[in-house]
Image: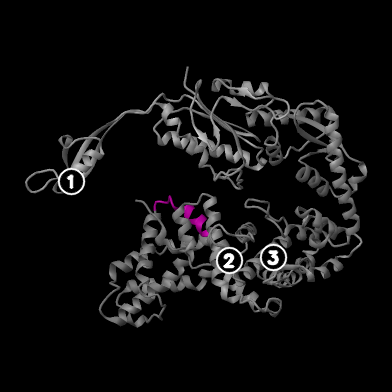
Amino acid sequence: MANKFLLEIGLEEMPAHVVTPSVEQLKQRVSSYLKDQRIEFGSIEMFATPRRLAVIVNDLAAKQPDIDEEVKGPAKKIAQDADGNWTKAAIGFSKGQGADVSDIIFKEVKGTEYVFVKKHINGQPVQEVLAGMKDVITSMTFPTLMKWGEFKLNYIRPIKWLIALYNNEVIPLDVLDVTTDKISAGHRFLGHDVEINHPDEYEEKLTEQFVIASPKRRKDLIKKQINQIATDNNWQINIDQDLLEEVTNLVEWPTAFTGSFDEKYLKIPNEVLITSMKDHQRFFYVLDQAGNLLPDFISVRNGNDHFIENVIAGNEKVLTARLEDAMFFFEEDQKSSIADYVERLKKVSFHDKISTMYEKMLRVKVIATVLADKIGLNDNQKNDLSRAAEIYKFDLVSGMVGEFAELQGIMGEKYALIQGENATVAQAIREHYMPISANGELPETTVGSVLAVADKLDSIMTFFSAGMIPSGSNDPYALRRQASGIVRIINHENWLIDVEGLLNQIELQEQVVQVAPQLDLKGQNAAVIDFLKDRVRQLLSDNKVRYDIVDAVSNSSSDNILYMIESANVLMDHKDDDSFKAVIESLTRVLRIAVKNPVVLSVDESLFENDAEMALYQAVNKLVANFNQLNANEAYDQLANLQNIIANYFEETMVMVDDEKIKNNRLAELNLLAQLILKLGDLNQLVVKG
């Protein structure tokens, strides 16, 4: 029988969101430990419930392999004195290796003789190696930690039991006051403690005690139960995968059941009902075959179906109370106008070092207006954008959003439509929060996209100006996420916007200065540009762009987000061209020499001494005339076309001559070309292969 090892950490109930990453971490740490200890093994199976993290290692080697190695010591001239006697260095080295000076041999390494000792290390039995699993357990990290009793170890939850079982042999180890044995805990209410005599028994023995240890088996069972209920009732169920994962990690013995609520609550917007069920109660909502929300739900109990009617009644009571609150807020909120809500925002702080939320909207309206002009919105779009910017935060002071914060923007759209705003304005109110996560949905409308960028850009500009700049992992105001949102939206919408020009234009607007007079917005422009460039770098890395190409465009002279992204794509497209190496070598030769004269001086044609200088100068002048109008692909093609001209220039021309006038004139000529190249990217960063 192949050797197996079971490690189970029994705990008080963990939060559902940490269960999966924690068991994955345990698997990784066990795997790394065994590899470090030179123990061969096969697969590792993961098991996890709210009360346990466990792995079973299959096909485990019985011992470490023996090792024969030569250990290098000091140089011969240090190991022996002039008379050939062994020095303290040699004696100490040999003893440290469990050998004697008589075991020393000499070998030459790069022209110098060194002391070597041949060493045989017997492999340890696997049982001795597995005793080190204590360090695996105690080294685990978690997003939240608890301390209990007088113990110094902080852990996700108090450790209640431990199993470390190699075949049928307990591996003795202890963590705090808990020592390993063969006893695991069954379901808290339905089961009992159970003795596990071999890893092969683990799942079956726990199942007998109403614990399904495999997350996949639990998840599959929950899906099967939900789908069966849907079939029996002719319902549609959109099984949210995040909710399914959470419910899977909340239970050990799942039993799905249905409940219902009064139809009167269907007057509330679906988003409110779904949020109440899904986010607050962990219920799956129910649709009819036409896609209409029904006054029913499906939930999952941690237990069997005994007395399920009491469980149903309890869940219905809790949901009804929440829906009653939602109904009250929904009706009360409609008694105030949007203008009333906007007026209340004058007393709501955006941040005490910056401004009120009302003043933020004033700034964002100006930023949105500048953006609208830059990207060429039509008059209707500008009017809708202006109206949306005037009111887009109004729902923050509504009762519904006060109770259900996750509905901000969503209720803004609902209430705006109810109060007669047009659909574009209403949708922009919802979309300005997007994307709400790293890979979240982007706004669908142009007006919503502009408002989203303006809102995020205002936050970054003002927080930077107030000295609250993210550092390390510290980003309490999620400015990196907002910057990523700006980059993703600009890329998606294909907007060519020079960030520095945009910032300068915004800061010239009197309205912006008036609502943030204490902030030095201009003083942080460089930092804001670098911050956004860093998010471009992250986007490109996430999209599997080659690291050297990411470095090249990230260090370009351009601050145009879309152009940087396009430049990266162009370089990726051409990197395998037969001509790529020659093109890049020509352009980087220009960059390397031009950097010796970073100031662009005027070029004097009368100082040219050969036709190659004139040919390059004319080609560059022709390119300069319209280079800023070229897209990145066109720019690359135009620069690549200069390869032969550049090669001929360097063949005919010595740049660094003694005559200062001629040298500076040639550097100035190369600098003109370098400025064009650097817009595409700092091509010196590229790794080109022959």
Which of pointers 3 and 1 indicates the residue nearer the eye? 1
Residue extending furthest left?
83
447 relative to 483 in the view: left or right: right
Q: Is residue 162 above or below residue 645?
A: above
Which of pointers 2 and 3 indicates the residue nearer the eye? 2
Q: What span is colored magenta in the figure? A: 566-578
Q: Residues within 10 Å of mark 3 (few under 14, many from 20)?
A: many
Give the structural element (helix, strand or loop) at label 3. helix
Q: Spatial distance from mark 3 to mark 1, Cα to Cα?
A: 72 Å
Q: Which residue is mark 1?
A: 88
Q: Which residue type does callout 2 highlight?
A: Ile
N-terminal of the pair, mark 1 or mark 2, is 1
Q: Which residue is mark 3?
A: 455
Q: Which residue is mark 2?
A: 469
Q: 280 or 206, which lies in front?
A: 206
Q: Residue at x 41, y 23 (%)?
A: 62
**Circle 2/circle 3 CB separation < 8 Å:** no
Q: Residue at x 40, y 80 (%)?
A: 601
Magenta segment: does it hold 576? Answer: yes
Give the structural element (helix, strand or loop) at label 2. loop
Q: Residue at x 19, y 35 (%)?
A: 100
Please state the horizontal and vertical placement of residue 331, each as a whole percent of the image.
Answer: 91, 55
Color style of the picture: one colour
